[in-house]
């Protein structure tokens, strides 16, 4: 497999010039200049509202449609089923409320303790309001692998919500297997791919996701969220909306005016991903180039991940939490005798950004015995170098004297 040219990739990110080693990608990646430029260009190109009469209207329309196509190419979806919103959290809250219109006592939803709270609380709140029952899927506290979902399923299961990858431990559950079991009882499968999308090729159909959500600011894009489903599924739902706003799908789900300039940034981010491995398939579709680039990125990140895990394993005071079979290059650790916050501060003073928290995966942190403090999270990205990983490891060793 062709290798990534990390030096070339890094040259696109102005923020890296400051010399900070960014292991904070799971909180939000750094942004290439082309993405920022696309946002600025869109804002100054003459846009207003979507329409077909004036060049201004058509430009605004095409920016919107291009962003839907970009997300569809990224995850293998249908552009007609791509909904944009302020964040994944907002989209999930809205969808859970909409789906719950059809629930009542006796209906059930399954959530996991491994998930970010944005893929738990919206379902819990919606279920409580509808009088439905919440079933909790746990995980092994040592490996962080999900428990078997089958005993939680019944013909009354309406939704199974699970993460494509844990933003705390990096665990990648076997989503396709959970989805197959959920589909066998007629449940809808909702996949939080916010942490998975920046690290692996995504294919909605192979995952078995009926609905998938992701957040472009985690993969070199601007701050907003995207939801992907089949247009047919969306056609059957009636979200709260204003009277004069479009009832077409996917617009029916988009409240108010979209941030068009950010949508231009989404397209630029997906184009940037497609070119992580430049000219890998001249003439190949963007979808094909995305898949090849993401496979190369995954391979690159896993070489660095091995180096990171080996280095941390060699430091006696360090505990790495979780040893999942399949994972993203995201590692949570704690250091004996030092609070996670103190480690974060110490590393920050060395220009190494590795934050400490539960990162909103509060249930996961508590279930794993880490309480509300969580740990120090190290996230690798396309722009991470081995030198930076060594700086982090040296920093942890320095803390221990
Ligand atoms: C796994 C995961 N899911 C969901 C979210 C929430 O995304 P958003 O900020 O777009 O609501 C995050 C944010 O960190 C996340 O890491």
Image: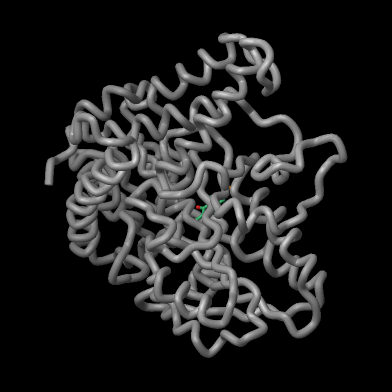
Q: Position of residue 360 (x, y in %)?
A: 57, 57
Q: Is residue 120 above or below residue 177?
A: above
Residue situated in front as seen by the camera: 160 or 124: 160
- Report the coloring of the rendering: one colour
Q: Position of residue 161 (x, y in %)?
A: 57, 68
Q: Is residue 361 above or below residue 397?
A: below
- Left/right of residue 90 with respect to residue 201 in the rendered view: right
Q: Is residue 365 visible?
A: no
**Residue depicted at 48% across the width and 36% down the height:** 69
Q: Position of residue 241 (x, y in %)?
A: 81, 45
Q: How many marks?
A: 0
Q: Position of residue 78 (x, y in %)?
A: 50, 47
**Residue depicted at 44% across the width and 61% down the height:** 164
Q: Is residue 385 visible?
A: yes
**Residue depicted at 36% across the width and 38% down the height:** 22
Displayed quadrant of residue 55: top right
Q: Residue furthest bottom?
A: 151
**Residue depicted at 77% across the width and 55% down the height:** 238
Q: Is residue 265 above or below residue 110?
A: above
């Amino acid at each position: 497999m062709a290798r990534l040219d990390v030096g070339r990739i890094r040259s696109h990110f102005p923020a890296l010039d400051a010399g900070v080693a960014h292991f904070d990608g799971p909180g939000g990646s750094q942004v290439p200049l082309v993405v920022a430029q696309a946002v600025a260009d869109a804002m100054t190109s003459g846009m207003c509202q979507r329409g077909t009469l004036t060049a201004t209207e058509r430009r605004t329309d095409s920016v919107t449609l291009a962003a839907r196509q970009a997300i569809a190419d990224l995850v293998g979806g249908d552009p007609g089923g791509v909904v944009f919103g302020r964040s994944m959290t907002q989209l999930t809250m809205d969808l859970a409320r909409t789906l719950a219109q059809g629930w009542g006592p006796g209906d059930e939803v399954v959530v996991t303790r491994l998930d970010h709270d944005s893929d738990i609380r919206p379902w819990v709140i919606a279920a409580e309001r509808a009088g439905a029952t919440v079933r909790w899927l746990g995980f092994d506290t040592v490996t962080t692998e999900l428990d078997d979902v089958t005993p939680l399923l019944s013909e009354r299961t309406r939704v199974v919500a699970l993460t494509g990858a844990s933003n705390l431990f990096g665990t990648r559950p076997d989503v396709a297997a959970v989805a197959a079991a959920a589909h066998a009882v007629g449940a809808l499968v909702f996949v939080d791919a916010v942490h998975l999308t920046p690290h692996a090729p995504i294919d909605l159909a192979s995952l078995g996701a009926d609905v998938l959500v992701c957040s472009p600011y985690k993969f070199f894009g601007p701050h907003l969220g995207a939801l992907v489903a089949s247009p047919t599924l969306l056609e059957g739902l009636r979200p709260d909306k204003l009277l004069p706003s479009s009832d077409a799908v996917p617009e029916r789900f988009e409240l108010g005016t979209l941030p068009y300039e950010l949508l231009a940034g989404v397209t630029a981010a997906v184009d940037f991903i497609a070119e992580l491995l430049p000219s890998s398939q001249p003439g190949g579709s963007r979808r094909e180039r995305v898949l090849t680039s993401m496979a190369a990125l995954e391979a690159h990140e896993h070489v660095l991940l091995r180096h990171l895990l080996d280095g941390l394993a060699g430091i006696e005071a360090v505990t790495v939490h979780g040893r999942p079979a399949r994972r993203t290059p995201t590692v949570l650790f704690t250091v004996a005798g030092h609070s996670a916050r103190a480690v974060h501060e110490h590393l920050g003073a060395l220009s190494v950004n590795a934050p400490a928290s539960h990162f909103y995966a509060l249930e996961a942190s508590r279930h794993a015995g880490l309480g509300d403090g969580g740990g120090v999270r190290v996230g690798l990205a396309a722009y991470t170098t081995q030198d930076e990983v060594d700086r982090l490891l040296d920093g942890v060793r320095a803390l221990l004297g």
